[in-house]
Amino acid sequence: MSGSTALLEVAGLHASYGQAEVLHGIDFHVEPGEVVVILGANGAGKTTTLRAICQMCTTRGSIGFDGHQLGGRATTEVVRRGIAHVPQGRGTFPDLTVEENLEVGAYVRKDKEVASDLSRWFEVFPRLAERRHLSAGSLSGGEQQMLAVARALMGRPRLLLLDEPSLGLAPIIVQDLFRRLDAINAEQGVTMLVVEQNASVAFEVADRAYVLEAGRIALSGTADELRHDDAVRRAYLGY
Amino acid sequence: MATALDTEGINDQLRSGLASIERFGSRRARNLGLLALFLVLFSIYAVYDGGLRLYAQRLVDAMDNGFVYSAMALALVLIYKATGVINFAQGNMAMFGTFIAYVIIVEQGLPVAIGILVAMAISALAAAVIERLFIRPFDPSNHLALTIVTLSWFLILAALAGVIWAYDPKAFPTPFPGGKNDFFDLGGVRIRYESIGIWLTVLVVVALVTLLLKRTKIGLAFRSVSSNLESSRLVGIHIGRTLQFGWALAAAVGTLAGCLIARVTYLDPNFMGRVLVYSFAAATLGGLDSLGGAVIGGVLIGMAETMLSGYVGFIGSELALAGALVVIVVILLVKPSGLFGSTRVERV
């Protein structure tokens, strides 16, 4: 829990849209290499938490990323510091081809390895390779989510934010997606912060989890602890 | 057995292929078919009415204005695609740019082509400044405010040009051979070298703009911003700078269009108003978010203009402008996405 080792250290974070405050002072942190899940019902503030990190809403409090404060910076600058955000509802570029979507993902990079990363992610997501010249808007929901993840990874982020990746996908596709996320975390060491309503699948990849209720952290612990917590079981696992 | 299975497989592939062609292509094919049918019927009438040679000559003449409308429509579509806003100032930005070319060419005595190129560069620079100072401070999703800003610039530039250069029409030179005898005869139809110059210039510019958008990093960023603003921010694209690039590019293309048509229309602070209305019609006809559609729309509108005033006795050149407005209204009413525009479908 020491602030010196955490990649992302959030303390006393308030976030609001205009007059409406959605987050009322939350604390959490993400260690390098971890997968951390934030669980919560609709309207709890999950999406806002991710948007607050990327400075897409008004924030108060401390958001430390790798020793730098993100508060008050432009979204573009947050991204350039190494945070990739896969927004809810995919966030792909429907008019661009699959390949162009991935190239845009590497927009902030200046190194020469973009092409080799491209072929690496095409290996991980062969469906995307088959469809590389089609427009992203013509892909299925599951393929678009894969594309959104791959596009985010093209930026070689140190922290990947995923906003309800399971939303609107068939259960078998959700399983597949989370298995890939788990593999990417294990093999490439990408740190992830995932917000989800689908707790059962999220617990399979998570190291630790937080439960967000009405803009406050209600519970926190390792994935195993929370999986067996009675309240979490009833509210999010449904048994 | 094996062969039977194979044919079945091929049949299946054919069937699914045909089905997908039907799904994606049938609407567009029908629209284009109707358009082609109309053009053929009109051609028959026109040839019957005034003879083949007159019709062919008018067709050729119509292309001059048509390609200029194409260029202007391209400029409008560039901005509209990226911002969702129609830039009403586009016409008068082009007018101002053409006056700058006039100063360089006629008053300073530089070669015509160089004058036009320098004026295009100055226009691009000025548009970038306007974008930075008057467009970027606004929320990009506040389309109404942005439209009002472009309308203000439409008026400001017109007034400014009036103060600086007054309202008497000025002759503008052409960069191409434009003398009385600079044409060749093709089966009795006069094709002027200047016409060919205009057509080729616009086509080259369209090709260059397309290459710029498809092959460069800033072009990719521009198309990303056009496609999804929020995600563009999330991959680290500088939205403001990217839109600024679009404004500069559109202004340069607009100034070129102004310089290509000014010899025919003469140059005064209101000369682009008419061109702008035709270009709106062209962009609407082509589908407001399709670059290729803008180019084809421009040529079609140019033809409609010439043919209406040529063959429909009571219309004349003033009413032809009203014809362009009718085109705009009818398309917005019947098929808002135009001939080539995209009706956006997003899966959720």
Image (cartoon, coloured by chain):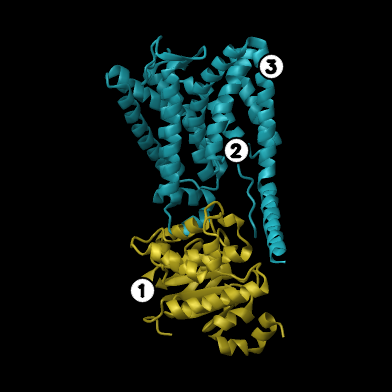
Chain colours: A yellow, B cyan
The label nearer to you, 3 versus 2, is 3
Q: Check disc 1: other Cα within 10 Å, few if <14, some if 14-19, many if 20+.
A: some
Residue type beneath disc 1:
Gly
Mark 2 highlights which residue?
B287
Q: Are marks 1 and 2 in contact (CB under 8 Å)?
A: no
Towards the viewer: A38 or A219: A38
Q: Is residue A95 visible?
A: yes
Horizontal side of residue B322 vs A182, given as left or right: right
Mark-to-mark CA distance, 1 and 2: 49 Å
**Picture residue at 38% right of the left edge, 11% below the top:** B179
Q: CA distance from mark 3 to mark 2?
A: 28 Å
- Can residue A74 be seen in this snapshot? no
Q: Nearer the viewer, residue B79 or B337?
A: B337
Image spot of residue B248 (x, y percent):
40, 38
In terms of sequence position, does the residue under pointer 3 or pointer 2 come before the other?
Answer: 3
Q: Are marks 3 and 2 on the same chain?
A: yes
- The amino acid type found where label 3 is placed reads Tyr
Residue A197 in the image: state x and y as whole percent: 63, 74
Q: Secondary structure at mark 1?
A: loop
Indicate the quadrant where residue B28 lies.
Answer: top right
Q: Secondary structure at mark 2?
A: loop
Q: Which mark is residue A56?
A: none
Q: Are marks 3 and 1 on the same chain?
A: no
Residue A67 tag number? 1
- A199 and B140: which is toward the camera: A199
Judging by the rendered image, the residue that carries numbered circle 3 is B45
Residue depicted at x 53% and y 38%:
B292
